[in-house]
């Protein structure tokens, strides 16, 4: 997971040199960070969900890691907008495998009352990856100037940002084989899981729409803010506070990583305790409350004048909000029948890919342009956070009665 977010977010640290070399507009960069990745993240998720419920999940995960690593390296070879678009689409299609595959595996390893904590520990990889991408990217820009040309053994000349993509993408081809160290309980125990298709799953969704609709909507909305912040915060600190890429990478990466590493296991442990004591809607109730609290901090990030204070608030924001990464998907896996868990996770990934991953960077870019562009990036991020996060909390809250009802019927059967 850390590797996937590293490859996904590296682009946000190299926006300015790429724009300078390839002449991309703000909207084109937003499309590369969002639609190019998110659309194919969505398209890849549905067949992947089908495969995960039928074949070896480690094998499917290995294939996805290999594909997205090739896509990351291809970003370093792109010469125009459409070749860059294709490379980002390849990353998106490959990365669609990891969340659904990992969530369905974890739900086989742990009982419901102990599932939130391992889901939280796993999900730390998402924000650790975001932090690592900034830290590694920032460190590499110290060694390899993104806007300088380098002659590689007299064979090819690469711009610095191209070399960085190649260096970051290549290790994934080997790291992918770590998937085969994971045991698939379903195959190892020779379980005969009833094979069902998406038509069967949609019948379950229709019967439980009062839970599914607000649950998915709440997660997509809070995800939009997270994706928008991660994509454009490096640009915010560069344009508004005048920090260099080398300064932004380690400091912003540290803030995101520390906040998440501290927050996620803490949230998971609290909710496991709450849930085991009979609070059956604990997962979404907790996320709704923390999302509202985090809204205040999100606004403050872009309102304070000092970059040090702003970076501290970034860490505090991710500490408070990070439960959204694990708790909603945990309750979804608990409620969903075992033979449909891959599909449930993949459909959520598909929806998230189109709206959050695909639309958030472009939304921020569009709002920034509407506010005058350039220096308005801070106001744009503030406005998006203030308007979207409370709606996310409301959606989660609306799902609570349905969660209680579903858990009661599950217990009675």
Image (tube, rainbow, N blue to C red):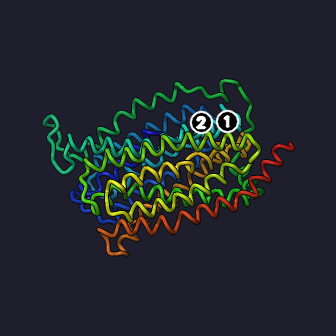
Which secondary structure, mark 2? helix
**Residue assigned mark 1:** 114
x and y, in percent, of residue 16 in the image = 26, 57
Element under disc 1: helix
**Number of residues whose C-alpha sits closer than 10 Å to that of mark 1, classed few (under 14), some (14–19) or many (20 or more):** some
Image height of 173 relative to 68, above or below: above
> Who is closer to the viewer here, 272 or 187?
272
Whole-percent x and y of residue 278?
77, 44
Up/down of 280 relative to 191, above or below: below
* The disc label shown at residue 118, or none: 2
Q: Are marks 1 and 2 in contact (CB under 8 Å)?
A: yes
Tell me where residue 106 sits by quadrant.
Answer: top right
Regarding residue 7, the answer to whether it shows in the image is: no
Of the 4 image quadrants, the one containing the C terminus is: top right
The structure residue drawn at horizontal position 35% and vertical position 39%, both measured from the top left corner, is 169
Q: Quadrant of residue 395?
A: bottom right
Place of residue 375 in the rendered image (x, y in percent of width and height, measured from the top left): 30, 68
């Amino acid at each position: 997971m850390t590797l996937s977010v590293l490859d996904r977010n590296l682009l946000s640290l190299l926006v300015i040199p790429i724009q300078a070399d390839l002449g991309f507009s703000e909207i084109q960069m937003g499309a590369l960070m969002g639609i190019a990745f998110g659309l194919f993240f969505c398209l890849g998720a549905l067949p992947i969900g089908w495969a995960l419920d039928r074949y070896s999940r480690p094998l499917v995960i290995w294939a996805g890691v290999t594909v997205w690593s090739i896509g990351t390296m291809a970003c370093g070879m792109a010469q125009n907008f459409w070749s860059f678009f294709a490379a980002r689409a390849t990353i998106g299609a490959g990365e669609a495998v990891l969340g659904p595959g990992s969530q369905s595996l974890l739900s086989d390893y742990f009982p419901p009352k102990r599932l939130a904590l391992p889901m939280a520990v796993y999900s730390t990889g998402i924000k650790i990856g975001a932090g690592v991408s900034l830290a590694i990217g920032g460190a590499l820009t110290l060694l390899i100037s993104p806007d300088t040309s380098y002659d590689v053994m007299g064979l090819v000349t690469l711009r610095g940002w191209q070399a960085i993509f190649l260096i970051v993408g290549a290790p994934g081809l080997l790291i992918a084989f770590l998937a085969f160290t994971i045991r698939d309980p379903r195959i190892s125990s020779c379980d005969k899981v009833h094979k069902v298709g998406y038509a069967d799953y949609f019948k379950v969704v229709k019967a439980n729409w009062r839970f599914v609709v607000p649950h998915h909507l709440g997660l997509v909305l809070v995800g939009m803010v997270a994706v928008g912040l991660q994509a454009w915060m490096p640009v915010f600190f560069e344009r508004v506070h005048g920090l260099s890429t080398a300064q932004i990478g380690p400091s912003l990466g540290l803030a995101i990583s520390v906040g998440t590493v501290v927050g996620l296991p803490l949230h998971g442990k609290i909710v496991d305790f709450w849930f085991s004591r009979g609070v059956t809607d604990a997962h979404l109730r907790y996320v709704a409350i923390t999302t509202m609290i985090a809204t205040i901090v999100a606004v403050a990030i872009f309102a304070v004048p000092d970059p040090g204070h702003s970076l501290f608030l970034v860490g505090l924001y991710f500490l408070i909000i990070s439960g959204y990464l694990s708790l909603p998907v945990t309750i979804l896996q608990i409620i969903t029948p075992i033979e449909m868990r891959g599909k449930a996770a993949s459909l959520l990934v598909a929806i998230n890919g189109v709206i959050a991953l695909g639309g958030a960077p472009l939304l921020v870019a569009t709002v920034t342009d509407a506010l005058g562009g350039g220096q308005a990036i801070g106001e744009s991020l503030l406005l998006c956070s203030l308007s979207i996060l409370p709606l996310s909390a409301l959606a989660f809250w609306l799902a609570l009665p349905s969660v209680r009802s579903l858990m009661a019927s599950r217990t009675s059967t």
